Image (cartoon, rainbow, N blue to C red):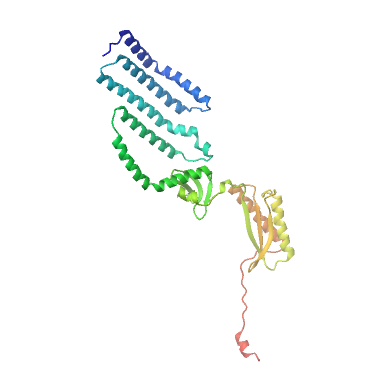
Amino acid sequence: MERIDPETAAAFVGLCVLVILFRSPLASAALRLVRWLMSSISITMTDEMEEEAGKFMRILLVAGSLLLTLETLSPPEFAGGFFRKVLISVLVLAIFAAWYRLVEPMIGLIGPDKITGVRLDTSWMVRLGQFVVVLMSITAFLEVWNIDISNALTGVGVLGAGLAIASQDFIRNLIAGMNNMSEKRFETGDWIAVQGGVEGTVTRVDVRSTTVMGFDHVPHYVPNSELSNAIVLNKSRMDHRRISWTIGLVRDATDAQLEAVCEALLRHMRESGDFVTAEGFPLRVIPFGLSDSAIEIRVQGFTQTKDYQPYLEASGRLVSALRRALREAGTELAYPTRTLHLTDRREERTSPP
């Protein structure tokens, strides 16, 4: 065994002791350097990230100084190899522990919603990232202690192939969910209606399914593959709500009464401020047909708002304007009627030819 200079050994031991004693100030200085490097590429570290980075740096300084001192002292192979592996294991576990805890803040910092333009639930990304970190940490730890994992990896490969076959539906929904996000069809908080399916508010976008809270407050868990192939109406992105009514006037209403009702309704829609009068948003109050018991008038227009409560209030004012127009014109709304013509069969039999 090579003889170690006592002065050199003492210097390294003293340096190790100093690093251990002043690990907090040294870690703070290193953290300031890291913060400066991150800010230079326009990334701001959160308080949680700084706390985890500080813990890791303190462990790194202590374990690194001990490992350097151990290499300098060159103890017997058995003891030195054991302690070397222990220190390296501590470093490996510290790295992956910090990485594990930083997965969630890092995903929040990167902001998938900034990349995709869609607000979505990222808990599945956090779980997936943490699983990968745990798997890598176990592999690295076993490698440090020279544990052969080739046979285990072969078994894992076979198991993985079987799981891949069994999880085809999961993979299909995962890819469909990524397509939905890339197309920016909806985000959490949007009111959507799936043609022939559910309608409600998107509350969660997960790796396999999307949760839509119905207006009856019953959650619907819709597989992403179904949403990817369906026609989805995103009603939160409409700019105005549309009114489209069919009003029936009694069939004995005169042309003057019909014209007076239409003009009064159209004047209300133009002057009330409840409806959009700009080009491209037509206002229509037009007689367009006859039913069995009514003259039908089509009323169409776009309200100034897309919010539901103001839309209901505008509809109520239009109803009041309709009732006022009917009173002033001296006519009324029609209701379904049927006329029966009765014939006396006895008169037909006794009548002369």
**Residue closest to the eye, 231 or 219:** 231
Residue 310 in percent (x, y) is at: 61, 48
Q: Residue at x 30, y 35 (%)?
A: 150
- Residue 347 occupies which quadrant of the picture? bottom right
Residue 183 in percent (x, y) is at: 53, 44
- View extreme (top): residue: 7
Against 113, residue 213 (above or below) is below
Image quadrant for the N terminus? top left
Residue 13 in percent (x, y) is at: 33, 13
Image quadrant for the C terminus? bottom right
- Residue 260 occupies which quadrant of the picture? bottom right
Against 1, residue 279 (above or below) is below
Residue 59 in percent (x, y) is at: 37, 22
Q: Residue at x 48, y 20 (%)?
A: 33
Q: Residue at x 36, y 33 (%)?
A: 136
Number of numbered markers = 0
Q: Is residue 270 visible?
A: yes
Q: Is residue 215 visible?
A: no
**Residue closest to the eye, 150 or 330:** 150
- View extreme (bottom): residue: 352
**Residue closest to the eye, 171 or 274:** 171
**Residue closest to the eye, 298 or 96:** 96
Q: Is residue 44 left or right of residue 302?
A: left
- View extreme (right): residue: 256
Q: Residue at x 32, y 42 (%)?
A: 158
